[in-house]
Amino acid sequence: MSKFPVSLQDIRDAEERLSGVARVTPLLNNLELDRRLSGRVFYKPESLQHIGAFKFRGAYNRIVQIPEDQRRFGVVAFSSGNHAQGVACAASMLGINATIVMPSDAPKIKLEGTKALGAEVRLYDRYTESREQISADIAEETGATLVPAFDDLDIIAGQGTVGLEIMGQLAATEVQADYLLSPVGGGGLMAGVSTAVKAIDPQLKVLGVEPEHYNDHGLSQAAGERVKVDGNTPTLCDSLMATTPGELTWSINGKLVDEFLSVSEEDVEHAISFAFRYLKLVIEPGGAVTLAALLQNKLSLDNKTAALIFSGGNIDSDLFARCLEKYPSP
C-alpha cells in the first residue's frame, strides 16, 4: 500500500480512463536548446492537449467517475482559466452541465474558451469575493458536484498521467533523465507527476518552478510547513497564483519534490519569446516557467539531461505580441 494519498496504481487507473480521450502529447528535443544549456533537454508541450493545457486530464478523470444519478445536477468549479476549460470540456464530452466561477480579470482567451465549451460562467472579483464560497453556495443550491482545481485525489491522479507518459517516452528512446521540472501553482500537477516519477525512478531529481511572488512552495519547503504568500502582487502567470500549497498536494510535494525554483516576470517573457522563435511553440506564462528557469541558469545541466513540462498555451494575443516585441532575439 502506498504511503502517499495517491499511488502509482491510481495514476495507471487514470491513464486507462483517459485512454482514447486525452491526447498523448509528444516529448520533444531541440538542438538549439541543447546547445544553449550544454545538456540534453526534452520538453512535453501540454499546450497541445485538449483545451491547450494539462488540466483536461484531471478534470476528466474526476468527472467521469461521478455516479450516473448525480450527473443530472451538473458540476461546479472555480478557476482563472485552464481548470475552467478542462472541466467545461470534460463535462461537455460526458453530457453534464457545468458552472464555472471565474475572476473578472481572467485572460480573455480562457474566459471565451470556457464559454465556447458550453459552460455557464459566474464572474467574481478576486480581491473582494471568495470563489470558494460562491462555488460552495452553487453546489448547495443545485446539488452540483464540486470539482476542485488541485486538492483532490482523482484530480492529482489524472494530472499524474503527464509524468507517466514522460517516463514511458524516455524509456522508449533509452534516455535516462537526471532532472524533471514542472510548473507549480496549487500543486496538483506537481503532486501527480512526482508520485509517478519517483515510483518509477527514485533517483530522478524532481523540481518545481514558481513565479517569484507566488513561491509559496519554496517558502513552505524552507519552513517545513505550509506557508501562505500575500497574493496581491500582479503576475503574468495567472495559472500559478495559488497563495498556499494544497493540503493534499503538499502532503506529497513536501516529501517527493527535491527543490523549488522561482523565476521573475521578465524571465517568463523571455522564455515565451524563445519558445516561439526556436521551438515553434506558443506557451502561456504559467507554462513557460520551467523553460525560464533553465534559460536563466537556475539549474545548471552541465552535460546532464532534463525533462520539462510546458503546462499550457492559453495566452492572450496582446500579451504574446508584447513578449515577442520585448525579446525579439532571445
Image (cartoon, rainbow, N blue to C red):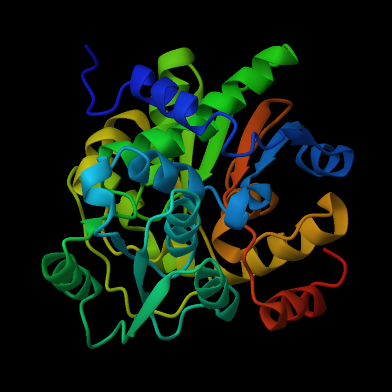
As rendered, which of 16 and 106 lies closer to the eye? 16
Visible in this render: residue 293?
Answer: no
* Quarter of the image with the N terminus in it: top left
Give left or right: position of 58 versus 37.
left
Residue 155 position by quadrant: top left
Residue name at image x 44 percent, y 48 percent: 94
As rendered, which of 253 and 110 lies closer to the eye? 110
Visible in this render: residue 104?
Answer: yes
Give left or right: position of 255 versus 325.
left
Q: Compared with residue 189, is residue 8 higher up or lower down, i.e. above or below?
A: above
Residue 226 drawn at (x, y percent): 19, 50
Residue name at image x 31 percent, y 63 percent: 77
* Quarter of the image with the C terminus in it: bottom right
Q: Compared with residue 160, is residue 130 higher up or lower down, i.e. above or below?
A: below
Give left or right: position of 271 versus 55.
right
Residue 309 drawn at (x, y percent): 59, 42
Give left or right: position of 111 versus 27.
left
Residue name at image x 49 percent, y 62 percent: 85
Q: Compared with residue 204, is residue 57 higher up or lower down, i.e. above or below?
A: below
